[in-house]
Image (cartoon, coloured by chain):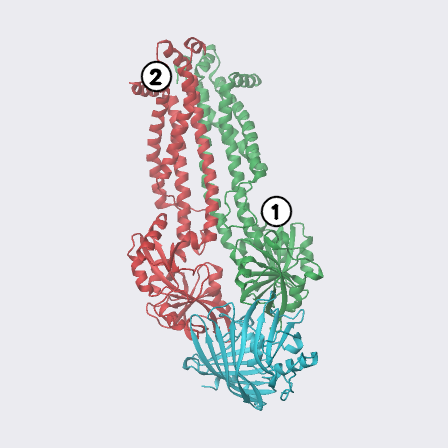
Chain colours: A green, B cyan, C red
C-alpha cells in the first residue's frame, strides 16, 4: 500500500505542468467556495448590522406593552438594577438605557413633532450611529454644562429654520400627571444618518435631563443591547431572553423587533443558497473534468502497467490514490488562494452599495467573514469528491484490457 | 395635528389668566428716558391689561393662510389661573364647537358627532381649532414681569411712543431672543410687539389697534399677528365684547356645559 | 475545408470532446440558471412587495413626495386616472387621499393617518380586500364606514360595528369632524401602517376634508415589472402636465430599493465567481487538450501545414465544441428556467412573510441576458484560452514537438 502511495505521488509529480494546471483548476474551485461563503456571511452580517447598529440594537429590554403603546408611564421595572445586572452578563458587550417620549420642538419660526430620546452619552455610542454621523457641532457631553444640549438631524434643523447653537423649546407631557412641561435647549450638534426617520424625527438629549424634565429620574423605557457575538440577537434559545423576560419586562431580539428584516435575511439566504448549490455544481463539474482529462490522457500508461502484469484492482487503486494526491495538492493550493483573496477583502472591505446620499458620513462596507469550517469542511468535501470522481476512471482502467487501453487515445 | 402657530404672549392676551386685580389707568408718561421702575410699571400694566379674576368676552378671529381664509366668532369665559371655556358661535359649520380647560387638561366638544374628546398631551402643541394658536397657548403662558428682563430701547422716531426691549431670562423655555414692545406714553397703550430670534432676525409682528373702552379699561380691541417668514399668513383677533370680573359661575367650566350649547 | 477537419477531429477524440463539452455545457446551463434565478427571484420579491401597497408607479402633484401636504392635490383625479388606464402596460390604478387626524372611541384617542380609497379600484390594484382580516371590506359606494389597522383597533379597543369619531382640519381650514362605523379590521403586514391607518371611502374622505374631485396620490400597477421605467415615461407623456410628478418604486420606496440593490449586487458578485470557475474549467480543458496534442500538431507541421491553418484549426475545434455546448445549453436552460418560472422553487420551512406578502416559492425568469451572458463567457473564454496554445502549436518546430511524449 505504501508502495502504491509513493508511486501515486511520483506519478502525480512527474508531470508537473499537468498536475499544476489540474491542481490550480480544482484549487480555484475550492477557493471560490470559501470566498463565496465568506461573502454570504459578510452580506448577512452587513444586513443585520446596518439595521441593528443604527439605533435598534441587537436586543432590547422594555416593559411589556411599552413598544406597542409608547405609553410614557410604562418604564422598565426594577431599573436601574436591571441595567447593572445586564452589564454583568458575559454575553452582553454593550448596554445603553434610553427614555423615549413624544414631544414637540419649537423654534422661532416653526414647530415639529419629534421623538425625544434621552440617552446616556457614555453608554450610547456603541449602540447607535448618531455619534458617527455628526456633521456639525459635537456629540452630547456628560458634563453639567451639557445638560441642555440637544442633538438634532440636519434635515430637522432645515425644517425648523435653525442652526447650530440656536435655542429651541421642547414640550412634552410629564409622566404620571400628564401635564405639559417645556424646557429650553440649545442645538449642540447636527447629524446626518441618511434615514429620514432619524434625521427628521428624532432628537437626543442627556438621559438625566430627560428624566428631570419628564418626572422619570432613575427610570428608563428601554435598554438597548449589543452582544459579544452578532449572531446571538437572532438566537431565540439564548438563556438571556428568559432571564430578563420577567417582572413585567420583556426582552426581545432584533428578529422580533424587526420581523421584516429577519424575513428579508431569510429570503436573501435562500436566494444565495441556491447560487451556492450552483457554484458547487460548477466546481464539481470542474473536478470531474480535470480529473478525467488528466487520467484519460494516461490510459496508455495504465495499459502498460496492466500489460506488465499489474492486477486490475491494483491499477484501479493506483488511480484512486493519484486522484487523492491531486486532491491533496489542490486543497492546499485552494485553501491558500481562498485565504489570500478573501483576506484582501476582509481587510479592505467591498464597497458595493455605493454612496446614495450625498454627505452621508459613514459607508456601507461589506466585510466577508472567514470561519474555520470553511477551511475544514470545504476542503474535506472537495477531497472526498475528487477521490470519488476518480473511482470511475479507476474502474474503467481496471476493467479494460491492456491492449485496448494502450490503443485508446482520446 | 395641524399647521402653523406660536406662542404664549398671544395666548395670554386672549385668555385672561392671572389673579392679580386690574390696575387702574397708568400715571402720566414722561418725555425723557424711563427709570427701571417706570419700565417695570409699564410692563406690569401690559401683563395685566387683558387679565382679571374672571372674564367674559366675545371674540372674532380671522385666520388667513395662502390656502384658505376663515373667520370664527366665539364666546369665552375664564376664571382664575387655570379655567377657561370657549364656545364657537360662527360660522355655521363650527357652531357649537366648544373647548374646556381645567388645569393642564383639555377637552373639545364637537356637536356634529356629539362627542367630547379629551385632547391627548401630544396634541396640545398643535394648533387650536385650526388657528395660529396652539392648545398649549391656552394652557400656559409667560408673563413679562416674571420671565423677562427689560430695558428701554432708545430708538424713538416717535416721541409719543416708548420702546421696551424684553429679553427672556436665562433658562426660561422661550424661543425668542428678544421682544421689543412699543407703548404709547398716554395711557400706556401697546402699539406693536416685534419678536426677534437670537440672531436678531425679525420673526413676527403683533400689531395692536382700535383702542376702545371695556369694563373701565382702555385697550386695543384688535390684535393682528403676522409671521415674517411665512408668506400670506395672518391672524386677526377682534374683541367685540369684553367684561372683567364678570362673576362667572362654576358650572360654566364643566363637561356638561360643553354639550349645552346645542 | 478546415471546418470539416475540425469537426472530424472533434468526433475522433470522443471522450475529450465530451468532457470539454460537458464543462462548457454544464457551466453554461448552471450560469444561465443562476442569472434566471437572481433576476427572477428579485423581480418576484420587488413585484410582490411594491404591488402590495405602494404600487409600481405613483403619481403625485409635484413636490408632494418631498414634503407631503393636504393642499398638494391631483385635481380631477378621475380624468387623470382615465388617461393612465389607457397607457399600454398599465394593469390597474387606484386613487388615495392622505390626511392626519385624531380618532376617538369612548375616552380613547389615537393619532391616525386617514387614507381615502376607492374600494373597487384599490382591490384591483393592491388586492386590498384580501387584507381585511375581520369584518368586511368597504362597499363600492360610500357608506360612512371605515376599516382600521389591526394594532390601531386594539389601541382603541374597538371592533366591527363600533363607531369611531374623527377630528382633523379640512383643506379649507374648517374643522373636519365626523363619525364612521367600523366595517372591518385590516392587516397590512407593516406594523407602522397597522398602528395608524384608518381607511375611508374616498368620497367620504373628500367630504370630510373638503377635497372635491381631488386625490393626493394615484398608485399604478403594471403588467410586467421589468417594464416599469418605460410605462412611467409613457404615463408622463400621456399626462403632459408639468405639475404632476410620475415616480417609479425605485424613487418612492427608497430604502427598500437600496436593500434590494445591495443584496442583488452581492448575488452578482457570486455569479461572477461562478463565471470565473466556469471559465477556469473551460481553460483547463482546452489547455490540456491542446497541450496533449502537440505531437499531432508537430506531425501536421512536418507534413507541410501552414501555421495559419493550424492556428485556425485549433481555434475552430474549440469553437465547434463551444457552439454545440452553448446550443445544447440554451435549450436545456430555457426548459429549466421556463419550468421554474411557472412552478417556482419552494421555500424550505414556513412561508416567508415580507412587507405583508406571503412567499411560498421563488421564481426564476427567462430573459435574454440569462442566455447571452453565459454564452459570451463560455465563448470568449474558450477562444481566448486557446489563442496562446494555438499560436504555439502553429509555430512549433516539427522535430522538437514530435520528440515530446
Q: Quadrant of residue C205?
A: bottom left
Q: In this view of the protein, which residue sits in the foreground, A9 or C366? A: C366
Please report, as a chain letter, where disc 1 is located: A
User: Element at badge 2?
Assistant: helix
- Which residue reaches farthest right? A144
Inter-mark Cα distance, 2 to 1: 63 Å
| Residue placed under numbered mark 2 in the picture | C309
| Residue placed under numbered mark 1 in the picture | A229
Q: In this view of the protein, which residue sits in the foreground, C64 or B24? A: B24
Q: Can residue C283 be seen in this view?
A: yes
Are the residues at dot 2 and dot 1 in contact (C-beta closer than 8 Å)? no
Dot 2 surroundings within 10 Å: few (below 14), some, or many (20 or more)? few
Residue A161 is situated, as x and y percent measured from the top left of the image, at: 54, 63
Please report, as a chain letter, where disc 2 is located: C
Residue at (45% x, 55% y) in the render: C355
Residue C20 is situated, as x and y percent measured from the top left of the image, at: 39, 25
Residue A202 is situated, as x and y percent measured from the top left of the image, at: 56, 60
Q: Quadrant of residue B198?
A: bottom right
Residue C232 is situated, as x and y percent measured from the top left of the image, at: 35, 53
User: Element at badge 1?
Assistant: loop
Quadrant of the image containing the C terminus of chain A:
top left
Quadrant of the image containing the N terminus of chain A:
top right
Name above or below for residue B225 compared with residue A360. below
Q: In this view of the protein, which residue sits in the foreground, B258 or B148? A: B148
Name above or below for residue B41 compared with residue C91. below
Residue at (32% x, 54% y) in the render: C237
Amino acid at each position: 500500500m505504501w508502495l502504491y502511495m509513493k508511486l501515486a505521488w511520483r506519478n502525480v509529480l512527474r508531470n508537473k505542468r499537468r498536475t499544476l494546471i489540474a491542481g490550480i483548476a480544482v484549487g480555484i474551485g475550492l477557493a471560490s467556495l470559501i470566498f463565496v461563503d465568506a461573502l454570504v456571511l459578510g452580506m448577512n452580517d452587513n444586513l443585520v448590522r446596518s439595521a441593528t447598529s443604527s439605533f435598534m440594537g441587537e436586543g432590547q429590554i422594555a416593559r411589556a406593552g411599552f413598544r406597542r403603546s409608547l405609553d410614557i408611564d410604562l418604564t422598565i421595572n426594577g431599573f436601574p438594577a436591571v441595567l447593572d445586572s445586564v452589564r454583568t452578563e458575559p454575553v452582553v458587550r454593550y448596554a445603553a438605557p434610553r427614555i423615549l417620549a413624544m414631544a414637540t420642538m419649537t423654534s422661532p419660526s416653526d414647530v415639529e413633532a419629534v421623538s425625544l430620546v434621552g440617552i446616556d452619552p457614555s453608554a450610547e455610542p456603541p449602540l447607535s450611529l448618531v455619534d458617527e454621523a455628526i456633521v456639525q457641532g459635537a456629540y452630547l457631553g456628560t458634563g453639567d454644562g451639557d445638560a441642555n444640549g440637544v442633538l438634532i438631524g440636519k434635515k430637522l434643523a432645515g425644517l425648523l429654520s435653525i442652526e447650530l447653537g440656536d435655542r429651541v423649546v421642547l414640550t412634552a407631557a410629564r409622566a404620571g400627571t400628564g401635564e405639559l412641561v417645556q424646557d429650553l435647549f440649545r442645538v449642540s450638534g447636527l447629524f446626518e444618518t441618511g434615514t429620514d426617520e432619524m434625521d427628521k424625527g428624532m432628537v437626543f438629549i442627556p438621559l438625566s435631563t430627560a428624566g428631570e424634565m419628564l418626572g422619570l429620574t432613575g427610570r428608563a423605557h428601554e435598554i438597548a443591547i449589543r452582544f459579544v457575538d452578532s449572531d446571538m440577537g437572532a438566537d431565540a434559545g439564548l438563556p438571556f431572553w428568559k432571564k430578563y423576560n420577567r417582572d413585567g419586562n420583556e426582552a426581545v431580539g432584533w428578529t422580533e423587533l424587526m420581523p421584516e428584516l429577519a424575513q428579508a435575511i431569510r429570503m436573501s439566504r435562500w436566494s444565495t443558497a441556491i447560487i451556492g448549490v450552483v457554484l458547487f455544481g460548477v466546481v464539481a463539474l470542474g473536478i470531474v473534468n480535470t480529473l478525467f482529462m488528466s487520467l484519460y490522457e494516461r490510459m496508455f500508461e495504465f495499459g502498460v502497467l496492466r500489460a506488465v502484469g499489474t492486477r486490475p484492482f491494483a491499477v484501479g487503486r493506483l488511480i484512486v490514490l493519484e486522484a487523492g494526491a491531486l486532491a491533496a495538492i489542490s486543497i492546499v493550493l485552494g485553501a491558500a488562494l481562498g485565504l489570500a483573496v478573501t483576506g484582501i477583502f476582509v481587510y479592505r472591505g467591498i464597497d458595493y452599495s455605493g454612496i446614495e446620499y450625498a454627505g452621508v458620513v459613514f459607508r456601507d462596507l461589506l466585510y466577508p467573514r472567514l470561519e474555520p469550517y470553511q477551511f475544514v469542511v470545504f476542503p474535506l468535501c472537495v477531497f472526498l469528491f475528487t477521490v470519488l470522481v476518480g473511482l470511475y476512471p479507476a474502474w474503467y482502467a481496471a476493467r479494460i484490457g491492456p491492449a485496448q487501453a494502450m490503443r485508446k487515445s482520446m | 395635528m395641524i399647521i402653523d402657530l406660536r406662542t404664549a404672549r398671544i395666548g395670554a392676551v386672549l385668555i385672561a389668566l392671572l389673579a392679580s386685580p386690574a390696575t387702574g389707568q397708568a400715571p402720566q408718561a414722561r418725555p425723557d428716558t424711563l427709570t427701571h421702575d417706570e419700565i417695570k410699571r409699564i410692563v406690569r400694566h401690559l401683563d395685566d391689561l387683558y387679565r382679571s379674576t374672571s372674564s367674559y368676552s366675545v371674540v372674532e378671529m380671522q385666520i388667513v393662510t395662502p390656502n384658505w381664509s376663515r373667520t370664527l366668532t366665539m364666546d369665552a369665559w375664564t376664571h382664575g389661573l387655570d379655567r377657561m371655556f370657549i364656545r364657537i358661535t360662527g360660522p355655521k359649520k363650527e357652531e357649537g364647537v366648544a373647548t374646556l380647560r381645567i388645569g393642564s387638561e383639555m377637552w373639545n366638544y364637537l356637536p356634529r358627532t356629539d362627542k367630547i374628546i379629551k385632547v391627548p398631551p401630544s396634541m396640545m402643541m398643535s394648533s387650536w381649532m385650526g388657528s395660529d394658536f396652539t392648545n398649549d397657548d391656552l394652557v400656559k403662558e409667560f408673563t413679562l414681569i416674571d420671565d423677562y428682563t427689560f430695558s428701554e430701547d432708545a430708538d424713538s422716531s416717535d416721541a409719543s411712543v416708548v420702546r421696551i426691549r424684553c429679553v427672556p431670562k436665562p433658562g426660561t423655555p422661550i424661543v425668542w431672543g428678544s421682544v421689543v414692545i412699543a407703548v404709547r406714553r398716554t395711557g400706556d397703550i401697546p402699539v406693536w410687539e416685534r419678536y426677534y430670534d437670537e440672531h436678531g432676525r425679525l420673526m413676527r409682528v403683533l400689531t395692536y389697534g382700535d383702542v376702545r373702552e371695556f369694563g373701565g379699561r382702555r385697550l386695543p380691541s384688535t390684535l393682528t399677528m403676522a409671521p415674517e417668514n411665512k408668506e400670506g399668513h395672518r391672524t386677526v383677533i377682534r374683541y367685540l365684547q369684553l367684561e372683567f370680573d364678570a362673576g362667572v359661575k362654576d358650572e360654566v367650566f364643566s363637561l356638561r356645559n360643553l354639550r349645552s350649547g346645542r | 475545408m478546415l471546418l470539416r477537419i475540425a469537426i472530424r477531429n472533434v468526433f475522433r477524440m470522443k471522450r475529450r470532446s465530451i468532457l470539454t463539452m460537458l464543462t462548457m455545457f454544464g457551466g453554461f446551463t448552471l450560469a444561465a440558471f443562476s442569472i434566471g434565478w437572481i433576476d427572477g427571484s428579485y423581480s418576484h420579491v420587488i413585484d410582490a412587495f411594491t404591488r402590495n401597497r405602494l404600487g409600481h408607479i405613483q403619481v403625485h402633484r409635484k413636490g408632494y413626495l418631498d414634503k407631503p401636504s393636504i393642499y398638494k392635490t391631483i385635481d380631477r383625479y378621475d380624468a387623470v386616472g382615465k388617461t393612465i388606464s389607457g397607457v399600454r402596460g398599465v394593469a390597474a390604478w387606484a386613487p388615495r387621499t392622505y390626511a392626519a387626524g385624531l380618532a376617538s372611541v369612548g375616552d380613547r384617542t389615537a393619532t391616525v393617518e386617514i387614507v381615502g380609497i376607492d374600494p373597487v379600484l384599490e382591490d384591483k390594484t393592491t388586492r386590498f380586500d384580501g387584507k381585511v382580516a375581520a369584518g368586511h371590506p368597504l362597499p363600492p359606494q360610500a357608506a360612512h364606514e371605515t376599516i382600521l389597522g389591526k394594532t390601531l383597533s386594539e389601541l382603541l379597543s374597538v371592533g366591527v360595528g363600533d363607531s369611531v369619531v374623527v377630528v382633523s382640519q379640512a383643506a379649507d381650514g374648517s374643522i373636519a369632524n365626523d363619525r364612521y362605523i367600523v366595517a372591518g379590521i385590516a392587516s397590512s403586514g407593516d406594523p407602522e401602517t397597522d398602528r395608524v391607518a384608518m381607511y375611508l371611502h374616498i368620497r367620504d374622505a373628500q367630504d370630510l376634508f373638503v377635497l372635491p374631485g381631488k386625490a393626493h396620490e394615484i398608485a399604478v400597477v403594471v403588467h410586467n415589472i421589468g417594464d416599469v421605467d418605460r410605462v412611467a415615461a409613457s404615463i408622463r407623456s400621456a399626462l403632459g402636465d408639468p405639475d404632476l410628478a410620475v415616480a417609479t418604486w425605485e424613487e418612492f420606496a427608497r430604502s427598500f430599493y437600496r436593500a434590494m440593490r445591495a443584496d442583488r449586487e452581492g448575488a452578482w458578485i457570486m455569479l461572477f465567481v461562478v463565471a470565473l470557475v466556469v471559465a477556469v474549467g473551460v481553460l483547463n480543458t482546452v489547455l490540456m487538450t491542446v497541450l496533449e496534442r502537440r505531437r499531432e500538431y508537430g506531425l501536421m507541421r512536418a507534413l507541410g501545414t501552414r501555421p495559419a491553418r493550424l492556428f485556425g484549426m485549433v481555434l475552430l475545434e474549440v469553437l465547434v465544441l463551444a457552439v454545440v455546448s452553448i446550443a445544447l445549453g440554451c435549450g436545456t436552460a430555457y426548459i429549466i428556467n421556463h419550468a421554474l418560472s411557472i412552478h417556482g422553487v419552494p421555500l424550505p420551512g414556513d412561508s416567508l412573510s415580507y412587507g405583508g406578502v406571503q412567499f411560498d416559492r421563488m421564481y426564476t425568469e427567462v430573459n435574454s441576458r440569462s442566455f447571452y451572458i453565459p454564452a459570451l463567457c463560455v465563448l470568449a473564454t474558450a477562444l481566448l484560452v486557446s489563442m496562446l496554445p494555438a499560436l504555439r502549436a502553429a509555430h512549433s518546430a516539427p522535430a522538437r514537438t514530435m520528440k515530446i511524449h
